[in-house]
Structure formats: structure tokens, C-alpha cells
Image (tube, rainbow, N blue to C red):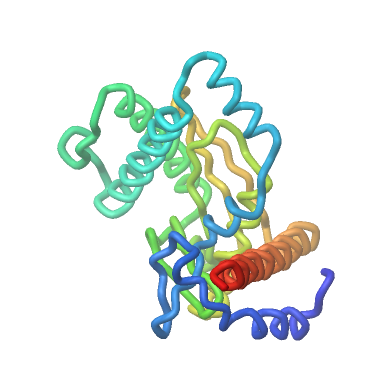
Amino acid sequence: MIFTNDQMKEILEKIKDIEIRNNTKSNYEIDDKRVPRVTEILSSMLHEDSLMNWANGLGWKRISYKAFMKDSQDKGTYSHLAIEKFLRKGNVDLDIDLQIPNQKIRDSVESCLDGFIQWWEFIHTEYKKIDVVYLEETMINEYFGGTCDCLLKVDNQYWLIDFKTSNHMNYKYSLQLAAYRYLLRNERGIDISKAMILRVDKNNHCYETQEFDLSNEIDRNYINDCEQTFMILLTAFKMRMYTMMQYQEIIKK
């Protein structure tokens, strides 16, 4: 860890009052102040050349980047809804419970749901008692906010789970988990034992997991480092917003 907990708290205190109301897409508010979303911070501060190359490749194929992203986002949104309804009701009828706009998206959602159910049935063979604590739970503090996909209590241990429908795992997901862990610990008083990415495949009716066991020193140190990395990104995000607002005021003169 680069900073001690006290040093990190001192940094966060210095940035918490930076107003970002007109410079964020977030609708999270606390004490009438808007705070950024976890996903907004990560997408804004972490750019990869591979994403630009991929978008350029779509252009060469005369595929609209915006249309492609909209289609991908719809698949993810409806897949999340299907999983949420399954966990709340114990079953889900894609045609009755969800108004899926077309067959292509429905096929992807069915594949993702199948993958999730495989995982759900598997963990029920491995553990005695599994309870859903949170689903799509919004958590906010004075610095940032986020929505936790799922928190389970598995044999008296808390598991934080984030669902993904992307084609591959990505280190950014660890930063997202670490941010939600911070919110759970500091806003809800919950210490998790495991943090997990559950990727459900849009085409092959399967799943894969990336699990971090916080009783394991290596995994725990990694997630702690991810938490500090996220806080540094949050600081840079708010300072960038602050600088932009300063610049806008200067050019008005």
C-alpha cells in the first residue's frame, strides 16, 4: 500500500467538497451534493489503446460504433434484469417478465441466464446455506456512489459479486469490486470474505469466475491495493473536474 489509511482519509477530506454537479452524469446525491458513480470514475480515468483500435476496426467494417455499443449495453442490461428476477422469484420467463426488443438480444440473455443458473446450481452443491442479502443495492457516501449487483451470505460469510457479460475478464473489474467493498465496509458495516466477478457468456451458455478470497494474504493485499488505486483515480477525477470548472470561469473573463 502506498498510503496509510489515515493519509488516504486526509486526501479524501480535501476533495470531498469539490462540487461536480454540472460535470457528471451521475444522479447520486448526498446532502444535496452530487457525487460521481464508480463506473463513471473508472471509464473516465482509464483509457486503453486497444479500445480505440477496436472502435476503428468497426469503422473499417462500416459498423456503427454507437449502434454496436447500444446493442451490447442492451444485452447486458436485460441479462442483469433476468438474473435479478431469477434471484428474487426463483425463476424467470424471458417473454413474460422482460420486454426484450428483439430475438438477437433475447438469445444473448438466454445464454447469460443459462450460465448464471449453472453457477447458482453449482454453489448450492458446495455450500449448505446461501441467502441473498442485496440485489442492485445503491450505496452512496460523501465521495462517490455505486450499485452493488449482488451480496450473498454463504455459510455465514459475505460474498460480493459483480455480474459481467463482456467477452473477457479485465483488471478494471477488480477496482470496481474494491470500491464496492469500501462502501459496504464503511456505509453498511459489512466485511466481505470473498469478492467475485461472475462473467456469463452471451453466446455459449456458460460462465467463468474470478474470485478473490480475502482470507488469503495475496488476494487481500491485491484488493487493498485496488482500493487505494480507485481512491487515487477518484482524487484525480475530482481534481480534473475542478480544473475544468476553473478554466471555464477564467475564459468567461
58 in relation to 186, above or below: above
Residue 17 at x, y percent in the picture: 56, 83
144 in relation to 90, above or below: below
Residue at 72 percent across and 85 percent down: it is 10
Taking 202 as reference, is 208 left or right?
A: right
Q: Name the residue at the top extreme.
A: 61
Residue 31 at x, y percent in the picture: 41, 85
Q: Nearer the viewer, residue 37 or 253?
A: 253
Residue at 64 percent across and 57 percent down: it is 175
Residue at 56 percent across and 15 percent down: it is 60
Q: Name the residue at the left extreme.
A: 96
Q: Name the residue at the front extreme.
A: 253
Residue 90 at x, y percent in the picture: 27, 48
Residue at 63 percent across and 62 percent down: it is 178
Quarter of the figure with the C terminus: bottom right
Residue 224 at x, y percent in the picture: 73, 66
97 in relation to 136, above or below: above
28 in relation to 128, above or below: below
Quarter of the figure with the N terminus: bottom right
Quarter of the image where one finds residue 134: bottom left
Q: Nearer the viewer, residue 228 or 160?
A: 228
Quarter of the image where one finds residue 215: bottom right
**Total tally of numbered discs in the picture:** 0
Can residue 36 be seen here?
A: yes
Taking 27 as reference, is 16 left or right?
A: right
Taking 113 as reference, is 158 left or right?
A: right
Can residue 215 be seen here?
A: no
Q: Nearer the viewer, residue 87 or 146?
A: 146
